[in-house]
Image (tube, helix red, strand yellow):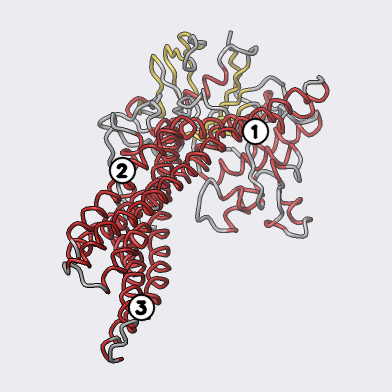
Amino acid sequence: MTTVDVKVARGVSPVRRLVPWVATEWKRLALAVFLGTMAIGCGVGLLAVSAWLISSAALRPPIFELNLAIVGVRAFGIGRGCFRYAERLVSHDAAFRALSRLRLAVYDRLAVVAPAGVPAYRRGDLLERLVRDVDATQDLPLRVLVPYASGAIVAIMSVVLAFFILPAAGVVLLVSLLLAATVVPWITSASAAEAERASAPARGELNGDVLTLLDGIGDLTTAGAAQAWLDRLAEDDRHIGRLAERRSRASGLASGLGILLSGGAVVVTLLVAIPAVRSGALVGVNLAVLALLPLATYEAVVAMPTAALALGRVRGSAQRVVEVLDAVDPVPDPESPVAAPVGVVGVRLAGVSSGWPGGEHVLQGLDLDVAPGGRVGVVGSSGVGKSTLLAVLAGFLPYDGSVRLGDVEMHDMTGHDVRSVVGWCPQLPHVFDTSVVENVRLAKPGASDEECRVALDAVGLGPWLDAAPQGLATPVGDHGALVSAGQRQRLGVARVLLAGHPVVLLDEPTEHLDESTADVVAAELLRALEGRTVLWVAHRPHGLASLDRIVRLT
């Protein structure tokens, strides 16, 4: 997909914040509006011409006088389906393209602000924002903009036609369509506004509770709290059901009001048209056209109450998406960034203080000097700032003092450049439910199988892959269920090796391994990272004896 720069202004409504992404596909959306107009127009034309044809045929004129109307009926009947099908293809194509760009924007924003910028989001709620809330924004072009635009155009054309045939009938049709296009959607949206706003957060709460239960089912069952969580899920589900019921009532109300208006328009039209026929102001065969025109034109406005409900859903989801897009960058990029250092670099900290958002600084005036290619272990009790130190060096947390990578101050580098130099391998690397090679290739998209295999061999996974029937294509399972803790840790280091980071942060790499495996993995990791600058945070002693020195945080 071609990359398009999308500029948005803060301080406007969440829905308006989505418009720039939709506007990138304005040509396709304009074509969709035209096709939708033609589809609805064919429906109106089909009913109007059919009414005229039946009325005229009753007078038994020469057949050649009806040929044009007969052809028109066929053309409108065929065109209605063809234009509607084409409109669906074009509008969905445009919506999905805009949706892809918006999703990438959300991902890109999360890559910048995570993990310190989104600490308040539960994992399930964040997943809901990334998937369903972003998906819901496609309703803006599909169920709001295109139906409203094409319906409005056809409604205007129908009013002009009715006014041309009989001005009084045109006024009646205009009033009924205005009510159907404005008052009915307003009543509908007002009756369901609260339910629409609450739906997206309610789904996020349910999703968060589900993931909490699934992740902790063992501990919750042991503690006897599983049933309480199941009851909580049931209440979440009932709450969402009540919101859906309120939306359904609003939709039913809109449908009933629309039928009432269209039927009322037919009655009033007949009341003004029949006297016009008697007085000779209206040709008799056109009476049927005027009588059926409100019913035919109703298709142009029937989607508008639905569009109002869809706009409510979009508004609720857009608010949650915008919260991610507007998440404050904990470490903003400098206005005039300096290029990242090249080659193996050292790390020097002078008077560094930092902490996680909302908390106190756990690092206070830290000084640390690691020579290029040096290996330093960092130890200390829980809560002294070991993980905070790693987050600072990875560019995720702001800091006071000085942190230099080689000869460059981190404050003067962009976050992307910092993370091109510094690679962080967490104590429990996340693996995706795909193959070994694809999990490693995440660190360097486009890397060949051979490059991935070199990195895997370097961390000691070569013999295992040779013995595995599927080799590099061996699946790791959901959350790494098909690999051991040691293999999972090695996959995380293989990513760092493949990415080529000259500075590597290891966060307790042997924490989840048994004693014998921990010694083996520690030795393999240090051998694989030969020639790189390494900071090894650890609680356990495995591998520390092979480091240049140990620093204890207190």
Residue where numbered disc 1 is placed = 237
Marks 1 and 3 in Cβ contact (< 8 Å): no
Asked if the residues shown at circle 2 and circle 3 are in contact, with their CB atoms under 8 angstroms apart, the answer is no
Above or below, comparing residue 151 to residue 476 in the picture: below
Q: What element carries label 1?
A: helix
Q: Which of marks 2 and 3 is nearer the N terminus?
A: 3
Q: What residue type is labelled 2?
A: Thr
Per the image, the residue denoted by label 2 is: 182
Determine the CA span between mark 1 and mark 3.
54 Å
**What percent of the width, then of the height, locates residue 428?**
66, 32
Q: Where is residue 265 in the image (x, y as percent from the top left)?
A: 32, 53
Q: Which residue is drawn at 53% across and 27% down?
A: 121
Q: Which mark is residue 54?
A: 3
Which image quadrant: the N terminus?
Answer: bottom left
Q: Is residue 78 above or below residue 507?
A: below
Position of the C terminus by quadrant: top right
For this view, does 68 lie left or right of residue 528? left
Residue 393 locus on image (x, y percent):
47, 26
Q: Which mark is residue 457?
A: none
- In the rendered image, residue 84, in percent from the top left (x then y), is placed at 40, 67
- 170 or 307: nearer the eye? 170
Is label 3 in a helix, a strand or a loop?
helix
Label 3 neighbourhood size at 10 Å, few (<14), some (14-19), many (20+)? some
Q: Earlier in the sequence, mark 1 or mark 3?
A: 3
Using the numbered discs, state the Cα–Cα distance from disc 1 to disc 2 in whole angstroms: 33 Å
Asked whether 64 or 39 is in front, the reply is 64
Quarter-wise, where is residue 408 in the image? top left
Mark 1 or 2 closer to N-term? 2
> Splitting the image into 4 quarters, where does residue 542 fall?
top right
| Residue 462 in sight | yes
Three-letter code, disc 3: Ile
